[in-house]
Amino acid sequence: ESDLAAIKVTHDALQLANQKQNTSTNIDNVSSPWKRAIFQLVAGDSQGTVDRVVNASIQDFMWFKLCIAISRNNEDFTTADIAKTIISSGPDHFNGSTNPYLFVRLLLMCEEYEHAIGYLALCGRNEETEALHMAIVLKTYGLLQIQNAPPNLNNASGKEDSSLSLVIIGDRLNDDHTMLLLGRLMQRYVSRFAHSNPRAAVLYLLELRPGLDAIDYLKSLLLETNNFSDILDGVDVNTSMSSYGDTNNSYIDMYDGDFDKRGGFLFQLCPEDPQFCLHIVLEAAKAAQVRGNMYAAVQLHLRAGSAECTNEAVNILNRQLVQVLLPTDNDARKKWKRVADSIGKNKHLLEKISKEKAQAFEQLRYLFEFFDLCRERKWENALQFVTWLLPENNTFVGPCASRYRYLDATVREAFPIVMENAVQVIREAFMDSKKRGDMNKMAQLQEQFQAYINLFSNIPVQTAKLAQLIASVEVTMV
């Protein structure tokens, strides 16, 4: 019976539409609002009678409006027109203050996906979570218009920021191209657990592919968490996320395995595009240098794996070693020495370093030993670690002067302070020998000191401090 009734209503509607009389007047004569709705849809006349048809509830309203929008006879009335009505009314008109999801559903029905996600993300922490996961699904099906936006560094640490208001770009009331800053929304969400569970954060940020956002935000994650071992080094990609918990607040200083290894977590997630992963690591390394985080820059360049990147890592390391030669900042000195020792033990890594950089690296490690022994007051042992740089007697003045000219810039920068300390070591060793009455040792130290003076006059290192020190020690050595 219901089918027969529907057929009769449709038949009546078609007859009504074919009549030459005014359609609106004919529809007005129909008593049932549901019949009026069917007549209106079949007749295809959306002017003047829309608000007088079915409007008992928002569901009826949307049903009727959407039916008109998809009608072939009403191309001038689309879902965009419905969206304008919904947006201009605002969420409060639909009890958005108590139930934001009704307003979101209406926007989704109108294909206003970006506006729906943006609005829901503003409604609270739980709603932000729902908005992100909804956005990921919509993006997967190609339904989102996404605008790239650089990471907000303040928000990476979980702080609130003004970028929240930029989740939506454009307005359906004035702009037909509403865009979503999905990267910013993603960043806000993963900042909740990026430090405690960086691998889960990686999984989310990879959803931003393709596009620059994925590279920018993964780079930001690396630098903000400093958790290179968990994100880049070898792990089982099938391991449950829950097993990592909150145990990742500390990280391994250096990767002790094969620096060329491509079995790391990020690489396993993107086996089809290893260059994408390498690009992220290199971009993060460059950004770390710009920020002055040289420790991170060294680790990231090493993990990039190529000979060029390895040489850049050692070049940065050498410059840092020069700055901490003197044991004034023990924490920084210990940290960089630990890095140097780790690299020095890795034969595979050392093979990638150019001869010049490798030589400078080894020379700086010798200088570290020299200063350590000086601090322990082991004068004679200390001098043994600088015989390649400073002459033991006049026979070696010429070779040492020639070697100086070919020193790497980092070692040459350290030369004045090394010679100053070596002169002081000779003085201390001379005084100790004098107390013991060891005349042979005193004569040997006098000869070595004279060789230092001759070298000083043969190389372009004429600092006033070093000249004054040599003069004062020369008086003591008589």
Image (cartoon, rainbow, N blue to C red):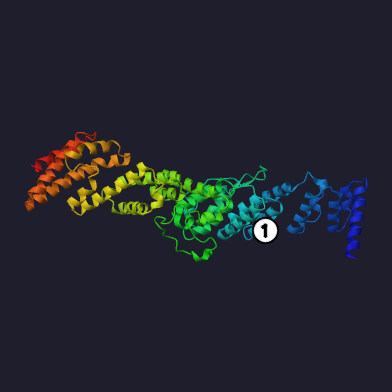
- Which quadrant: the N terminus? bottom right
x and y percentages locating residue 252 in the rendered image: 41, 58
Q: Is residue 28 left or right of residue 181?
A: right
Is residue 394 rendered to the left or right of residue 58? Answer: left
Q: Nearer the viewer, residue 218 or 15?
A: 218
Is 22 rendered above or below residue 2? above
Residue beneath the point at 38% across and 46% down? 314
Q: Nearer the viewer, residue 233 or 346?
A: 346
On screen, residue 327 versus residue 274, left or right, reads left
Total number of numbered discs in the rendering: 1
Furthest residue toward left: 437
Left or right: 54, with 183 as reference point: right
- Single out the residue that lies furthest toward the front: 395
Please tell me which residue lies in front, 143 or 121: 143
The quarter of the rendered structure image containing the C terminus is: top left
Could you tell me residue 366's position as x and y percent? 27, 48
Residue 392 x, y percent position in the rendering: 18, 43
Which quadrant of the figure has residue 457? Answer: top left
Residue for point 47% across, 50% down? 154
Q: Residue at x 73, y 47 (%)?
A: 81
Task: Inspect this view and state whether residue 207 appears.
Answer: yes
Towards the viewer: 243 or 310: 310
Number of residues whose C-alpha sits closer than 10 Å to that of mark 1, classed few (under 14), some (14–19) or many (20 or more): some
**Three-letter code, disc 1:** Leu
Q: Position of residue 352 (x, y in %)?
A: 41, 47
Q: Which element is circle 1 on?
A: helix
* Residue 465 seen in the current view: no
Question: Label 1: which residue?
Answer: 102
